[in-house]
Image (tube, rainbow, N blue to C red):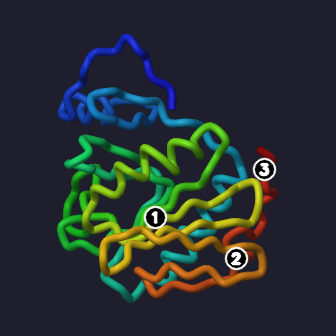
Amino acid sequence: MVVNQNQLYVSPEDYLAGERESPIKHEYRRGKIYARAGVNKPHVIIASNLGALLGNHLLDNDSIVLNSDIKIRLEEANCYYYPDLVVTCDEWDLSSNEDFILYPSLIIEILSPSTAKFDRGGKFADYQTATSLQEYVLVSQSQMSIECFRKNEQGIWISQTYSSGEKVNFASLDFNCQMELIYQKAKLAKD
């Protein structure tokens, strides 16, 4: 994320109006606007693979998978983020024509060296304010490794890591697939 430290507070309404006109994407966090980091080919391939796998899995379901062109509005955290992939099953999100969703059930971020620390820390804390969120998934693009955080019945986030040769499970969607399908055709980037 890149931010102008001299920038004054920007309201969510002004951010949304500017974002609708901007040729590049920006995220919004508590009154500050951040340019989205660029991505490389492995990132795009992994996101495309996951999007296709999840989209096919959800074809006969009242859920949709959306790519990084849609924002999530986190009202309690006062943020708008563009996750790499998000799944929503909420009727409002499914029927709304807004350029953001409010009720994610699964969020996937593909890690890069410039975003990994924030994706694991501040962004995850902000995402946790979405009461609809059941799973948060961090996908490495430097090795076959996926970390899935699931909210248990007590509201505690439990982590499970998947490696090469294992089957990945997103319990919120009853989705299972071999790790290699997610990384198919992606030449892993070196950190």
Amino acid type at circle 3 is Ala
Q: Earlier in the sequence, mark 2 or mark 1?
A: 1
Name the element at disc 1. strand
Picture coordinates of residue 108 (x, y %)?
A: 50, 61
Q: Residues within 10 Å of mark 3 (few under 14, many from 20)?
A: some
Tell me which residue sits at (48%, 68%) in the image: 149
The answer for how far apart the CA atoms under marks 2 and 1 are is 17 Å
Tell me which residue sits at (63%, 67%) in the image: 146
Residue at the far top: name it: 6
The answer for how far apart the CA atoms under marks 3 and 1 are is 22 Å
The residue that mark 2 highlights is 179
Q: Residues within 10 Å of mark 1 (few under 14, many from 20)?
A: many
The answer for how far apart the CA atoms under marks 2 and 3 are is 17 Å
Tell me which residue sits at (74%, 76%) in the image: 180
The residue that mark 3 highlights is 189
Amino acid type at circle 1 is Tyr
> In the visual, does 112 lie left or right of 186?
left
The residue that mark 1 highlights is 136
Tell me which residue sits at (41%, 15%) in the image: 5
> Is residue 65 among what the camera can see?
no
Q: Earlier in the sequence, mark 2 or mark 3?
A: 2
Q: Is residue 61 above or below residue 118?
A: below
Name the element at disc 2. helix
